Image: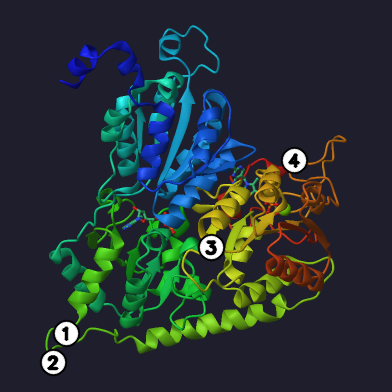
Amino acid sequence: MAEAALKEKPAEAAEERELTDGFHLIIDALKLNGLTTIYGVPGIPITDFGRMAQASGIRVLSFRHEQNAGYAASIAGFLTKKPGICLTVSAPGFLNGLTALAHATTNCFPMILISGSSEREIVDLQQGDYEEMDQLAIAKPLCKAAYRILHAADIGIGIARAIRAAVSGRPGGVYLDLPAKLFGQVMDAEAGRKSLVKVIDPAPAQIPSQESVKRALDVLKGAKRPLIILGKGAAYAQADDAIRAFVEKSGAPFLPMSMAKGLLPDTHPQCAGAARSTVLAQSDVVMLIGARLNWLLSHGKGKAWGTERKKFIQIDIEPKEMDSNVEIVAPVVGDIGSCVAALLKAAAPLKAGDEDPFPLKVADWIKTVTSKRDENVAKMAPRLMNNNVPMDYHGALGVLKNIVKERPDAILVNEGANTLDLARGIIDVYQPRKRIDVGTWGIMGIGMGYAIAAAIETGKPVLAVEGDSAFGFSGMEVETICRYKLPVCVVIFNNDGIYRGTDVNTVSDDPAPTVFVKGSRYDKMMEAFGGVGVNATSPDELKRAVNAAMDSGLPTLINAVIDPAAGSESGRIGNLNPQSALKKKK
Ligand code: ADP
Ligand code: TZD
Ligand code: MG
């Protein structure tokens, strides 16, 4: 009808029709769905799109490398429960972003990688277009879902699909392919407006069955030595009050996985963080809330888990996660907010006189855990107060532990090997989603992308504690931090290399593979872009510099000089290195 009416009008009138195009429809579709921040790198075919998005009020953060923009988008997804958006050019830019997309999927973070792509006709005939690559096919196995939009009229529905795929069920990474031609495609503005979709209830609640909730409670009630393990899925769920209420009512010790630290403070009387080996080995019933039994939990079996067979209860949105490594005797499938609420409700006595299972009657067990924890904390305390120069990890981390205690709303970013493993154990976290780190893959390179997104998405100060190697993967983004004037303080634990700075090559002049230039001054990198650089050689200097940075909110990089001999191979996971049988024979 509309088309017929249009044809009958004189030519001039048709030209006066209000028109829109792909550029504007994509921007409108993102804004309609509350996606107002884009992390990316400009270039053909998305340069103008970035400009227009910025002009329309979308925050466009331009990075120096797509991988860092992608990590930023992935952690924005974790922090906000909305898909983080990463925007790249075709082929090489797309591939640079793809690592981050796979990382988001692996970590269950919602993210959408939007890449411009070359002309389909040329790509499909492999005729050698500018940055030619069949991006959709390459992305598919590495993400949760992948879509391509060919027509302007499909932009609304395409973006809606991408959003829903990223955040519903188990969150993950979604690839959205936008061929160059799409951006300039013109259509009637009114029809365009009508084609947009505001996604209603993008991550619908998934209510667990009553039966599964009752089964889980029955198993928990039967425990003599219960343990609750909180994972980053629990942090992501933003059901903080319900989780805290459940853990406290149960009276059971809890163990936070690294990005779940702070859901309840690490200083909470039920926290078993400093008695990890004891609770893993000695517990009889383990309730997992948003944590997988992957390598980080020794797959739920083997020496770390003791000799007695455990009963596992698992709360997760992904049904396929159940029985992935060991038998789950009480699977509770649903979103964590709904599951924990259902558990609390089912546990509450219905009428006066009914039995209340909580708190569980496990006083002896609590005493065992508490005394182990206090013993470990006491053993560590003097090491954290040492004033050695050059600093060791403990002296430097003791300082940072106290600073975070005084500034519990700062966000801690952490990567490295020794720098990661020791900081995770030493620095207490007090609030949910305040610690973000290398995640499921133990990946290096998330540092500056995470720091930038954390500052942008939360408006809170950021403290990034970085191994010197880890920092190198994203170091150029200190310019980005300076450009956007972000309140980020980067502390580099500079031990001259990977794990240690002491390896020596005995056969040639080449340095050993794990060592870097000795005595590097990373602080000068920050000064190059107008930020504050400090070289800190003692715990006192470190303390002063970090406090000054956190007070001023100025982009700061502190080169913390660490004894090159202080670290150990691969930090805490040296056991995962394969060993040569021949090495020892020499
Ligand atoms: P960690 O590394 O902290 O142990 P994992 O990444 O292994 O945590 O596990 C996170 C789990 O949380 C995943 O299995 C994922 O399916 C689950 N998850 C994520 N979000 C939710 C949610 N809203 N409700 C329930 N489960 C969730
Ligand atoms: N590449 C990527 C992407 N991820 C990795 N995890 C590694 C390589 C291997 N790797 C680690 O697992 S830790 C690490 C590397 C290169 C760096 C450790 O050195 P660091 O920390 O300076 O960051 P410490 O304090 O010296 O141990
Ligand atoms: Mg190092």
Amino acid at circle 1:
Pro
Residue kind at label 4, given as amino acid type: Pro
Q: Position of residue 563 (x, y in %)?
A: 80, 61
**Spatial CA span between label 1 and label 3:** 36 Å
Front residue of 255/187: it is 187
Of labels 2 and 4, earlier in sequence is 2
Earlier in the chain: of badge 4 and badge 3, it is: 3
Residue at which label 4 appears = 513
Q: Where's ligand 1: which quadrant?
A: bottom left
Percent position (x, y) of residue 585? 71, 43
Q: Residue at x 72, y 65 (%)?
A: 549
Which residue corresponds to the image point at 20% horizontal and 75% vertical from the top-left?
A: 345
Q: Which residue type carries mark 2? A: Ala
On screen, residue 225 versus residue 270, left or right, reads: left
- Which marked residue is nearer to the observer: mark 4 or mark 3? 3
Q: Amino acid at mark 3?
A: Arg
Spatial distance from mark 1 to mark 2, Cα to Cα?
Answer: 7 Å
Residue 328, compared with residue 194, is above or below; it is below
